[in-house]
């Protein structure tokens, strides 16, 4: 998979650079794409999505507990 469009998007739109561009590519890769492009796509974003949801839940829960209990 060509990672150049991802690098340009990150640099021009998000104003960030990535040490490991494969993490960005994985973050934007849906499971259905991996199923349809088995030769070029390596991973999909579900593991990152699960981890992100857990971290967000932890932060929100901690904030609510600290400020409203």
Image (spheres, rainbow, N blue to C red):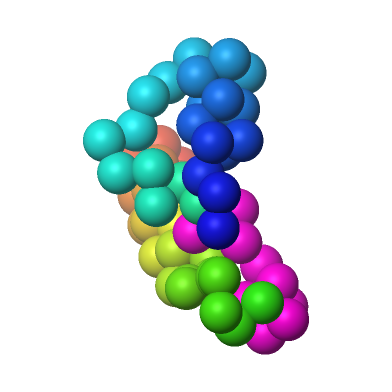
- The range drawn in magenta is 26-36
Q: Nearer the viewer, residue 59 or 44?
A: 44
**Total label count?**
0
Q: Is residue 35 left or right of residue 55?
A: right
Q: Is residue 55 above or below residue 64?
A: below
Q: Residue at x 66, y 67 (%)?
A: 30
Closer to the camera in the image, 61 or 12: 12
Between 32 and 41, the one nearer to me in the picture? 41
Q: What secondary structure predominates along the stretch shown in magenta?
A: helix
In this picture, is 17 found above or below 28? Answer: above
Residue 50: image location, x then y, percent: 48, 70
Give the quarter of the figure containing the N terminus: bottom right
Residue at point 61%, 35% (across, down): 5
The residue under the point 50% across, 19% down is 11
Name above or below for residue 2 compared with residue 40.
above
Confirm whether the magenta stretch covers residue 30: yes
Say if residue 27 shows up in the picture: no
Q: Position of residue 46 (x, y in %)?
A: 54, 72
* 22 falls in the magenta region: no
Coordinates of residue 59 in the picture (x, y in percent): 38, 48
In this rendering, is residue 58 above or below 13? below
What percent of the width, then of the height, locates residue 15?
Answer: 49, 15
Q: Could you tell me which residue is drawn at 30 percent across and 44 percent down?
A: 20
Asked if one can make out residue 63 in the rendered structure from this viewpoint, the answer is yes
Q: Is residue 17 left or right of residue 35?
A: left
* Residue 41, quarter of the rendered image: bottom right
């Amino acid at each position: 998979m060509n990672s150049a469009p991802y690098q340009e998007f990150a640099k021009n739109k998000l104003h960030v650079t990535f040490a490991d561009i494969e993490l960005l590519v994985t973050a934007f890769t849906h499971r259905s794409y991996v199923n349809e492009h088995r030769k070029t796509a390596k991973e999909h974003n579900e593991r990152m999505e699960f981890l992100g949801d857990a971290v967000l839940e932890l932060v929100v829960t901690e904030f609510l507990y600290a400020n409203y209990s």
